[in-house]
Amino acid sequence: MSDFRASLRARARAAGRRLVLPEGDEPRTLQAAARLRDEGLAQVTLLGPPEAVEAEARRVGVELGGLAVEPPPAGGRGLDEAVRLYLERAAARGVTADEARRQVGDPLLWGALGVAAGRFDGFVAGARSTTAATLRAALRGIGTRAGVRRVSSFMLMDT
């Protein structure tokens, strides 16, 4: 393992962050979640219908112990809080309460709103979703820091 990767892993272990993975029933996401858990790099929550997440985990041989699985929002206080939070961010774009209620059902947006609400420290997606969809959810759900007008991204490849 490179010194760079070892340094990142050490920093991740020390930080004790909570990550949400919105594509919880995607095989690579499940494998990544298990690796994060096994290496002590983060506390992980997988989003998705529990039955689908469990079935896919069995299929790919991933043990879910130590990983949280959260179903999509179906109602109740959590959904109401997410809708309120999303409306605060999306009201300027003319999003109505009914539209917000439908849109927060998107696991990417649900995960991003969880970060905005402080339930999670970050979210990782893109195994199944496009970069555009992932960034759109992050911008709509989390937003940018005050005064930030541009966003960018990068990829590291350590071979």
Image: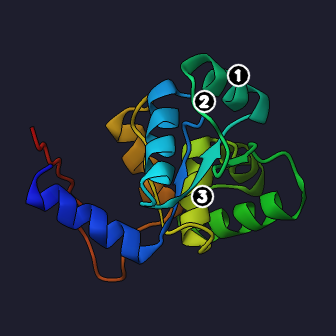
Residue 25, which numbered label?
2
Residue 93 visible here: no
- Say which label, 1 or 3, has the lower sequence index: 1
The amino acid pointed to by label 1 is: Ala
Residue 144, which numbered label?
none
The amino acid pointed to by label 3 is: Gly
> Within 10 angstroms of label 3, few (less than 14), some, or many (20 or more) residues?
few
Q: Which residue lies at the image location 38% right of the left edge and 76% below the top edge?
A: 14
The x, y position of residue 75, in whole percent, is 88, 51
Q: Are marks 1 and 3 in contact (CB under 8 Å)?
A: no
Residue corresponding to mark 1: 55
Q: Could you tell me which secondary element the residue under label 2 belongs to?
A: loop
Q: Where 31 sits versus 104, above or below?
A: above
The x, y position of residue 60, in whole percent, is 55, 20
Q: Where 69 sits versus 141, above or below?
A: above
Q: Residue furthest bottom?
A: 146
Residue 147 appears left or right of 111: left
The amino acid pointed to by label 2 is: Asp
Residue corresponding to mark 3: 94
Q: Residue furthest top?
A: 59
Q: Nearer the viewer, residue 140 or 73?
A: 73
Q: Could you tell me which secondary element the residue under label 1 belongs to?
A: helix
- Say which label, 2 or 1, has the lower sequence index: 2
Q: Nearer the viewer, residue 132 or 129?
A: 129
